[in-house]
Each structure stands twice: as C-alpha cells, then as structure tokens.
Amino acid sequence: MTDLAPPEGFIPAEFTPGFLDHGGPYFLKKNGGAPLLLGLRICSHHINYRDAAHGGVISTFADVALSHAVYDAERPRVAPSTITLQINYLKGAKLGDWLEARVRIDRIGGRTAYTSGEIVRGEEPIATMNGVFAIKR
C-alpha cells in the first residue's frame, strides 16, 4: 500500500462527475448490513493555511457520507437533498490521514430522512455529524 492508497476493502466511489471530483477522491467499503463506509485520504488540496484539513473538506465529507447512506438505503434508490447539516469539529486532520465516516440512518419517512454519525481517524472521532434530507421517491 502506498501512502495515498486506501485501506484494504475500499474501492473508488466513482460518484457522478462534478463538484465531488474536487473534494475527493472518495472511497466506499461494504459494512455488513449497515450503511457503506465512506473513506477519504487527506491530500495536499485539502489542506488549509494551518497545515490541517480545511473545515469545509470535513463538512463536505460529512454531507457526502450522510446523503449517500440515504441514497443507498432503499431500492429503487431515493434522491436526497440536504435540508440541514450540523458538524461538530473535535480534532483536526493532517496531510496523509485516512478518515472514515460512520453513518447511522435514524429514520426514513415518506419525505424526510434523519441521519447521524461520526468521522474517525482510526478509532479516534474527529467530528460528529447530523443531517436531515428531503427525499424524492
């Protein structure tokens, strides 16, 4: 494994081209019956003037992870749109860190999905997150 390669079991997410190409690359891993794990290696384009991952990178990672869990929760897939997103930053991430988003779907209703989770470096939480999404079936 090179320094930038994802851990074993993670594959490129290959999200639709566009904005997400700039924030990643993102990686996915099956997680049993739970939502897929989403991973991100902190690269030089994620770093701010303090040599840490910019808060916007962490926020975008949280939004991508939470919304993807909703998207992938049902068949046929639902189309989530973010209503609210709350991030609590606990620690910084540095160049080369491997981050994983651990997501819980708290409730999916007819038009709204509620999610929560944390972003971890190893087993150390660096952020917690909550999101509410409008869904279109």
Image (spheres, rainbow, N blue to C red):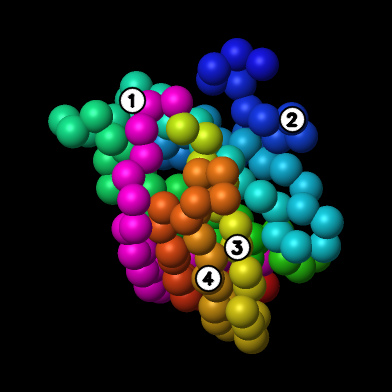
The tag earlier along the polypeptide, 2 or 4, is 2
Find disc 1 in the rendering and name its residue. 45
Asked which secondary structure carries label 3, the reply is: strand
Asked which secondary structure carries label 4, the reply is: strand
For the magenta stretch, what is the residue range? Answer: 76-96
**Residues marked 1 and 4 touching at CB (< 8 Å):** no
Q: Is residue 71 above or below residue 9?
A: below
Q: 10 Å neighbourhood of mark 3: few (<14), some, or many (≥20)?
A: many
In the image, residue 77 lies in the stretch drawn in magenta: yes
Q: Which residue is pictured at 66% across the width and 16% down the height?
A: 1
Find disc 3 in the rendering and name its residue. 103
**Residues marked 2 and 3 touching at CB (< 8 Å):** no
Q: CA distance from mark 1 to mark 4?
A: 27 Å
Asked which secondary structure carries label 1, the reply is: helix
Q: 10 Å neighbourhood of mark 4: few (<14), some, or many (≥20)?
A: many
Question: Mark 2 belongs to which amino acid?
Answer: Glu
Please identify the residue farthest to the left as the structure is shown.
49
Asked which secondary structure carries label 2, the reply is: loop
Q: Is residue 55 left or right of residue 3?
A: left
Q: CA distance from mark 3 to mark 4?
A: 6 Å
Label drawn at residue 116: 4
Pinpoint residue 15: horizontal percent, then vertical percent. 59, 39
Find disc 2 in the rendering and name its residue. 8
